[in-house]
Image (cartoon, grey):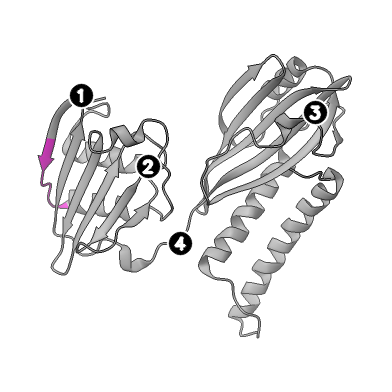
Amino acid sequence: MSAIDVRRHWGFAVAASAVAAMLIAGLISVQGATSAAPLSPDGLRTVAARAHLVQLLRSAPRLPGAQPAAATGESALSHPAVWYGDPDTLDAPTWFTAPGSIKDGVTYLAAHAPPEVTNESSGSGSDYADIIFAATPTEVITGVQIAYTIVPSGKGVAVRVDASGVLLHVRDPATYVQDATSVDVDVIRTGAPAVNLRPTGAAVSTLADTVNRMTPGLSTATGDCARMQGEHSDVLTFHSPQHTYVLMAPLGCTDDRTTLAIDGGAPLELRQSAELDTAVLTVLGLPMNYGL
């Protein structure tokens, strides 16, 4: 990564937040019949998501005595502690230095968690420490995290902080499951017998609503996901008077390839949702750890 003066970066963060506010204000005036061109729905989401990350970054605690610093010199600070390998990942970074040791930094952050975080994880070696806080997702961004990397530098430490997440795209209403009257559900698990049932009534609406809350995105297989496809999955086939919808939802990875095909057409990739598997198992009366 090229050298970045963090003093300018912090100024840019403030400016980006202001720009986001002006864009949103401009969009409101567009609705009032001004000549300005409105942003697309995805453009609006991107503005809102970036503004949210900038706000998280500004509210993330700094170590005592922190001073803005350039993003140079320490290779461990040239990349975020967390990266999804996803083209929809958004990231807002900043860097600073502080007196003290890596242990001092870890201890301080453990006692001064950023606001609105839900859990914490960490990792360390002889010359670095990563501290990761999971923040609450919003309607426009998921997987939101605040990640710190601390390394020795001079007589103190150098720190990189990232607020990051994955943008949730707008879904075309034409891809929603509509007017479904029945659904065939296949639950496939390596560690248990396969289940095939056709729930009716309210269960159909429950599952259709869950599928319709899933957002589009380019799924990325990681780890042992390829091996698990076809062995750990939920397959839902919805029937309506007009269409047949087939959802293939492999399990095991955050962004494995979950697809929805309508009448055998080209599949739409959707981000895998833990909510879906929970809904399927609940509707079928199966334990949450079925076959796992």
Question: Which amino acid type corresponds to the residue marked 1 in the rendered image?
Answer: Gly
* Lower position in the chain sequence, tag 2 or tag 3: 3
Q: Residue 147's x, y, as percent?
A: 64, 33
Mark 2–mark 3 distance (CA, rounded to whole Å): 35 Å
Viewer-closest of 153 and 30: 153
Mark 1–mark 4 distance (CA, rounded to whole Å): 36 Å
| Quarter that holds the C terminus | top left
Height in image: 134 above or below 200? above
Question: Which amino acid type corresponds to the residue marked 2 in the rendered image?
Answer: Asp
Residue matched to label 2: 256
Residue matched to label 3: 158
State which region is magenta: 195-201
Question: Which amino acid type corresponds to the residue marked 3 in the rendered image?
Answer: Ala
Whether residue 213 is visible to the viewer of this picture, yes or no, is: no
The residue tagged with tag 2: helix, strand or loop? loop
* Lower position in the chain sequence, tag 1 or tag 2: 1
Residue drawn at 28 percent across, 62 percent down: 266
Label 3: few (<14), some (14–19) or many (≥20) C-alpha neighbours in 10 Å? many
Residue matched to label 1: 191
